[in-house]
Image (cartoon, helix red, strand yellow):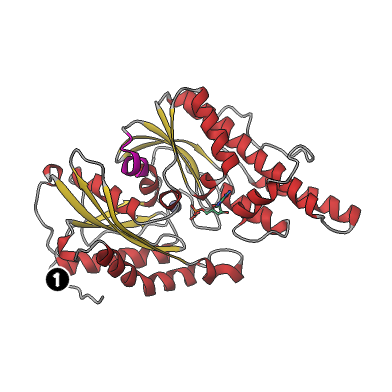
Amino acid sequence: MRWCYLAPYTLAIMDSSLAPSLTILGIESSCDDTAAAVVRSVQGQPAEILSSEVFGQTDLHANFGGVVPEIAARAHAEKLDHMVEAALANAKLTLQDMDAIAVTAGPGLIGGVMSGVMCAKGLAAGSGKPLIGVNHLAGHALTPRLTDGLDFPYLMLLVSGGHCQFLVAHGPTKFTRLGGTIDDAPGEAFDKVAKLLGLPQPGGPSIEQAALKGDAGRFTLPRPLRDRDDCDMSFSGLKTATLRARDALVAQQGGLYKKDQNDLSAGFQDAVADVLATKTRRALGSSKVPAIAVAGGVAANKTIRAALEAVAQEACVSFIAPPMALCTDNAAMIAWAGIERFRLGLTDDMTLAARPRWPLDDTATPMLGSGKKGAKA
Ligand code: KG4
Ligand code: ZN
């Protein structure tokens, strides 16, 4: 698909809050997934994902031990129009059938976010459709409303390779951050620990697999910040402690046996689950909301998921875990967040800027550190 910039850009005038049916194209390119999706929302009915296309860049970055921003940005620029074309074709609709175009405008790797924003601006200008800039974290945080029609307020735990934070969602644009990691995101720690144990990437699934045969009690690994009376977390010290335990074994016996890999994996996974469960208990205690939802690749981990579900049960709140394809980066969540914004009458114009950092709760103290998969916010 090719488009050209038509000036002057005109915004469609309509009262979007009253529209009975909205169909929005979503575009996501903030990290290493190039995605486009079409979502339809009819007032009073569950939303429908008409298409959701994701091109994952894992193979492009495999040799570099992390996402290379320049490679990611170039791949997004090359793939975006194909993803948009596929999303429209699979929804059996055209650009003219869209009510608006929603795009991730941050936070994330700036080159990728810019590719998406430029693409969306081109489409909006060419079609005369409204443009909506969406916060990527809001996309994740609003997903339980797309999948389960969850009502506000609720607690959201984002746990992925780039994010780790507790948010209370009060409304489509109102979030309170209760805490988050001050260093590595948990997925990042899983990936680094897998690497130091000689397990394949992505580290989360391989550690989970190894841990199945492991003895979590053999190594005493730390639970950083677990007992501090807040919702902040830290996973960097746990990673270093696992490295030290590995080094001690290597010095003692000249290498690692399979059993050592399994036991260290189980010990590490248990420590992460313990920290996340304890902090979730605290976050539920302070927020007093009736539900908790999770999102992010780490939420796929069965031990972690079970630990969080047990905390929810103990606190008598509902536990919502959207399907994995909607927990990880995708454009359906961006289209949905766009629908939520559009219903509030919130649209953007051609001055919409790509933002590497964009905290959902700008009253919260900024978090430290920056994950391998992009800037935290
Ligand atoms: O949300 P996601 O797909 O992507 C971004 O972070 O952008 O999360 C990927 C992260 C990786 O670090 C991966 O190791 C981790 O989620 N992950 C897991 C599991 N599956 C994926 N971590 C623990 N257990 C898993 N089963
Ligand atoms: Zn994400």
Label 1 environment density (alpha carbons within 10 Å; few <14, some 14–19, many ≥20): few
The furthest residue to the right: 252
Corner quadrant of residue 38? bottom left
| Mark 1 beta carbon near ligand 2 (under 8 Å) | no
Name the secondary structure under disc 1: loop
The amino acid on which the numbered mark 1 sits, given as a three-letter code, is Ala
Residue that label 1 marks:
7
Instruction: Indicate whether residue 72 is drawn in magenta.
Output: no
Position of 323 with respect to 337 (left or right) is right
Residue drawn at 85 percent across, 55 percent down:
250
Q: Quadrant of the N terminus?
A: bottom left
Residue 102 in the image, given as x and y percentages of width and height:
27, 56
Position of 178 with respect to 200 (left or right) is left
Residue 315 in the image, given as x and y percentages of width and height:
49, 23
Q: Can residue 298 be seen in this view?
A: yes
Residue 15 in the image, given as x and y percentages of width and height:
10, 46
Position of 283 with respect to 342 (left or right) is right
Residue drawn at 54 percent across, 29 percent down:
310
Magenta stretch? 143-150
Dominant secondary structure (helix, strand or loop) of the stretch shown in magenta: helix
Residue drawn at 43 percent across, 53 percent down:
325
Corner quadrant of residue 293? top left
Give the answer, above or below, for where 323 lies relative to 109: above
Residue 103 in the image, given as x and y percentages of width and height:
30, 58
Position of 308 with respect to 54 (left or right) is right
Q: Is residue 231 visible?
A: no
Nearest the eye: 212 or 19: 212
Instruction: Indicate whether residue 147 is drawn in magenta.
Output: yes
